[in-house]
Image (cartoon, grey):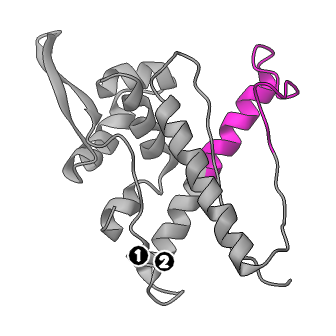
Amino acid sequence: IRRVDVLRLLADPVKLRIYEALRDAPASPHELALRFGLKPTALYHHFARLADARLISVAARRQRRGVIERQYRPSARQLVVDRQLLRAAPTSRSVATVLAAASAILQVTADDIRTAAADPSRPLADRERSEVAMVLVRTTPARARELMRRLRGLLDAATRFDGLGQTRVRLTLSLVPVGER
């Protein structure tokens, strides 16, 4: 993602969920509304914005109740934010948008943790199936770079595992330089 206006769309947790859901299988706004427990009219605007930004595209058209229903799929398998969006001043629109998108990602992750906590079939206490952790590491710049390299390796491994089964898991990683507080 190289444009702030496109990234701003993914700063909305609903649009982020739509994008993720379409990775599982093409779907129409009506189908996802039923899955999300929403009215279909609540999603049409989101789909239109995602399609206008070319984040999703029409995968199929079919006749449904006398109208042509469009099913959409993501335009890319993976989204990566261009680091140039972070090179601006800390108060710039692009940095604010990256922060908003990061916040949406963390909100979606927190929602998934809440849902798992309430669902006995997905016990958070099962260390084979879930992990929630935060660690503050004091290290050298060279070792911080090594840690980043290893995290990228974990992301690459997760990407290679994607599509190999029906079990869905969320991996949310953040490696951020932290100042003294």
Task: Give the magenta part as a residue range.
Answer: 106-132
Give the side of residue 124 with respect to residue 45, left or right.
right
Say if the magenta span includes residue 141. no
Disc sitting over residue 85 in the figure? 1
User: Which comes before the other along the chain, label 2 or label 1?
Assistant: 1
Quadrant of residue 21 within the rendered picture: top left
Q: How many marks?
A: 2
Say if the magenta span includes residue 122. yes
Give the side of residue 106 with respect to residue 139, left or right.
left
- Structural distance between the alpha carbons of marks 2 and 1: 6 Å
Between 62 and 148, the one nearer to me in the picture: 148
- Tell me where residue 11 appears, x and y as whole percent: 47, 57
For mark 1, give the secondary structure: helix
Q: Is residue 37 visible?
A: yes
For mark 2, give the secondary structure: helix
Disc sitting over residue 95 in the figure? 2
Amino acid type at circle 1 is: Leu
Q: Is residue 175 visible?
A: no
Above or below, 146 relative to 177: above
Of the two numbered discs 2 and 1 in the rendering, the one whose residue sits closer to the viewer: 1
Quadrant of residue 127 within the rendered picture: top right
- Tell me where residue 36 appears, x and y as whole percent: 50, 26
- Tell me where residue 163 appears, x and y as whole percent: 44, 24
> Looking at the image, do the residues carrying marks 2 and 1 touch, with CB atoms under 8 Å apart?
yes
Q: Quadrant of the C terminus?
A: bottom right
**What residue is drawn where x is 79% and y is 37%?**
131
Between 126 and 66, the one nearer to me in the picture: 126
Between 60 and 45, the one nearer to me in the picture: 60
Amino acid type at circle 2 is: Val
